[in-house]
Image: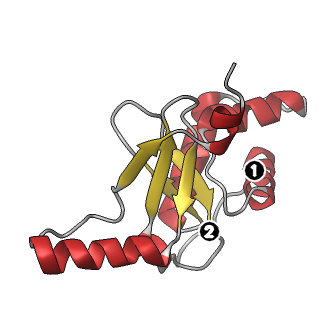
Amino acid sequence: MSKAPYKTKQMAELLTFLESVQGKHVTVNEICDYFKEKGISVGTTTVYRHLEKMVKEGVVAKYVVDGTSSACFEYTGNCQIVEKECSYHCKCEKCGKLIHLHCDEVESLKKHMMEHHSFEMDSLRTVFYGICNECRNNKE
């Protein structure tokens, strides 16, 4: 007999926030800033603990792009992510923003790399570095 998952008010608030930003990547710092703005007292450790639990449950996906950046989390709901196999990212070298990339052109590049260079790209860890549109437009 398995126990029902224990849900706290903080976990419910976190889930509500993640659902509101579905399709976007968020960091623990962004989540904590959101709670602070709403006047909700939640510690960073609590946020990490709840996120890790949600990752294990398959409700949230965790992305670690490189060793220097914070992990990003994305709400996936109760469905398993089929796209995880084609989960490329773009990372802005100025602001650090991480953009989830679903693009047939990148899949074509992956196929080309295998067929012509005998190199299999790891789509979960492939990151394109550059400057995002916001940073390009905000040049001073």
Q: Which residue type carries mark 2?
A: Thr
Judging depth in this view, the residue of 94 and 67 nearest the camera is 94
Q: Nearer the viewer, mark 2 or mark 1?
A: 2
N-term mark: 2 or 1: 1
Q: Position of residue 21 (x, y in %)?
A: 75, 56
Q: Is residue 125 above or below residue 72?
A: below
Q: CA distance from mark 2 to mark 1?
A: 20 Å
Q: Residue at x 82, y 27 (%)?
A: 36
Badge 1: residue crowd in 10 Å (few <14, some 14–19, many ≥20): few
| Residue marked by disc 1 | 8
Judging depth in this view, the residue of 90 and 15 nearest the camera is 90
Q: Is residue 122 above or below residue 78?
A: above
Q: Position of residue 6 (x, y in %)?
A: 67, 58
Residue 76's label in the rendered image is 2
When asked about the image quadrant of residue 20, the answer is bottom right
Judging depth in this view, the residue of 87 and 95 nearest the camera is 95
Left or right: 82, with 111 as reference point: right
* Marks 2 & 1, CB-CB < 8 Å contact: no
Left or right: 3, with 91 as reference point: right
Element assignment for label 2? loop
Element assignment for label 1? loop
Q: Residue at x 54, y 74 (%)?
A: 2
Badge 2: residue crowd in 10 Å (few <14, some 14–19, many ≥20): some
Q: Residue at x 62, y 68 (%)?
A: 76
Q: Residue at x 44, y 74 (%)?
A: 105
Q: Position of residue 1 (x, y in %)?
A: 52, 79
Q: Which residue type carries mark 1?
A: Thr
In the rendered image, which quarter contains the C terminus? top right
Left or right: 63, with 9 as reference point: left
